[in-house]
Image (spheres, grey):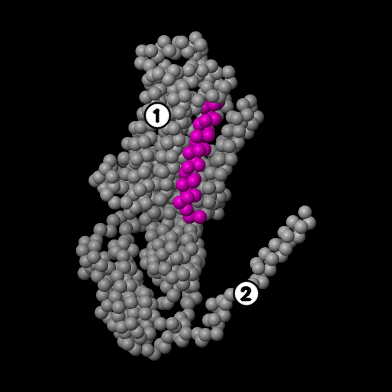
Amino acid sequence: MILFLFSLLVAASTAVLIFAGGMVTSTGSGLSVPDWPNTYGWFMWTFPVEKMVGGIFYEHTHRLIASTVGFLILVLAVWLWRAEPRAWVRRLGYIALAAVITQGILGGITVLWYLPDPISIAHASLAEIVFCLTVTIALVESPGWKQAYSRDGRGPVDDPILRAVAITTTALVYAQILIGATMRHTNAGLAIPDFPYAFGHLIPPHWDAKIAIHFAHRVGALIVTTFVLATTGHVFYHHSRRRELVRPSLLLLALVALQITLGAFTVLSGKQPLINSLHVITGASVLVTSLVLTLRAHRIRFGEGAVGVRVPREPRRPGDLRAHASAGARA
Amino acid sequence: MDRIYSTCIAALVAALVIGCGGGQKPTTDTAQTAQAPPPPPIDPTTVATISGRITLQGTPPKAERIQTKSDPNCKQPVFTQSYVVGKDGALQNVFVYVKDGLGKYTIPVPTEPVVLAQKNCTYEPHVLGIMAGQPLELRNDDPTLHNIHAVPTANREFNMGQPIQGMRQTHVFSATEVLVPFKCDVHHWMSAFVGVLDHPFYAVTNTDGTFEIKGLPPGTYTIEAVHEKLGRQTQTITVGAKESKTDLSFTFKV
């Protein structure tokens, strides 16, 4: 249980780190500390607080949080190595550690090479992977996962359609984040300055690379929303009594609604840094929520004594679900 | 096995021979220029002067006071510097230089540095010129940290930190470039523009919009005026020996 709580702390701290990283980019502070790993020649942790002015505040704070998260992930990896009986979970810890180290190096290269777009985009994209890894570790350390969501004796859901649609949604959310990172780091965030239209039209009347990236992000938002609705709709229709699926579905819907609103306000506010950064962290939250839903939908595949509730291919009316669920429990 | 080994050795020797210059030596530009006589220096007895005035037509955006609260050390009021317009539309901070027409002359590169200071959380001066190869001294006069971040296209980008008041660092540009933008990522409002040339025939308009380029050999020149927001304008002008042309004017519109 303590390991679960600690892994939750690590996942939460990763979210804070992503928000801090978003603030660095949003305020244009990425190069306000020109050296790395030192800060203006100081060892990172001895840099005077009173000197954290202007853009240095955002960049140096990001570095401090990143170092803390790196240390927490190191502790988590060692803890898993020592205490976790499941080999694949231990491996997740090692991968998370390798990813966060790589992420730190990418961050350093970004500074030393003056924010080259590919490195900056890779830095932003790997951040999401690190977040996914820490959330996954927290999830698989949770009591619910360990009990295979079968406290009431039903066992985990075995629904191939849900698995397919959920994993597709998660992949699409990640792709959308990659486009968003590209838009952000190529400075295309205001390439289309109006919302919901594009230069007053549904389709931009003229094109260049930045407009294309920006418009792709908007189209991506529509696609992601469609798939989120499909996934959550499937959960509400077929698994309305499965709390482990309904809760992340509700959260996912709320987050997507918030994310679209923040996206609109990012444009309309001329990329106000706080709104912009909230858009970044909400996007990451959409990703991990979709991931949690996907992993829970796949829980049956992880074995460990779980008993599945197979869902027939024929869709059923909500009234039939209870009967179906109890039939599954008996099985 | 021996055959493979001997083949590898032969390939390695061949690679070494080629790599160490076993092939034909290319003729270098240096060898050619060493044989050619150096271009003559500019004759100081014949030099001309070009001067004029640059104005702005229209109403520019008002200089606004910048919010500097993010650094309590920036106590002096700071205003936007993109449009500094004086009496009768006199446009300050325009970089004027000889773009084309200068013959081949031996022009010594000054060893005296040009200073770009960070003072009261602004770059001072806002626009300046320098010759490629001439030292640019970057100085922090403020009791706070600055980073000096140049974003050139023809030269190498650099970003150096000056955390202590009074720090000085020197940078030398290797290629000509008009204009190289400078920024400070700590204080997002700070900007400067540096014109890097292979000759000293440039000027920056002052408060009354005037400029003067001295010491030009007689000839026909393309003069370009560059403003950070308003772009570029060119004019052609011919000057004779010892001539002084004072009527070169540019008008930018906003």
Residue B130 seen by the camera: no
Counting other residues with Cα less than 10 Å from the Cα at mark 1, is it few (<14), some (14-19), or many (20 or more)?
Answer: many
User: Which residue is denoted by mark 1 in the rendering?
Assistant: A252
Q: Chain of mark 1?
A: A
* Amino acid on which the number 1 mark rests in the picture: Leu
Give the Cα distance between marks 1 and 2: 69 Å
Task: Report the residue at 37% width, 80% height from top.
Answer: B101
Residue B169 drawn above or below residue A167:
below
**Magenta region:** A113-141
Tag on residue A19? none
Residue A226 in the image: state x and y as whole percent.
35, 32
Any magenta on residue A126?
Answer: yes
Q: Chain of mark 2?
A: B
Q: Quadrant of residue A266?
A: top left
* Amino acid on which the number 2 mark rests in the picture: Gln
Residue found farthest to the front: B3
Any magenta on residue B203?
Answer: no
Q: Nearer the viewer, residue A104 or A61?
A: A104
Q: Quadrant of the N terminus of chain A?
A: top right
User: Which residue is denoted by mark 2 in the rendering?
Assistant: B24
Residue B27 drawn above or below residue A301:
below
Task: Report the residue at 46% width, 40% height from top.
Answer: A18
Task: Report the residue at 55% width, 18% height from top.
Answer: A306
Query: Under tag 1, what secondary structure?
Result: helix
Using residue B243 as the reference point, say whether residue B165 is left or right of it: right
Query: Principal SS element in the magenta part?
Result: helix
Residue A78 in the image: state x and y as whole percent.
63, 33
Residue found farthest to the bottom: B45
Counting other residues with Cα less than 10 Å from the Cα at mark 2, is it few (<14), some (14-19), or many (20 or more)?
Answer: few
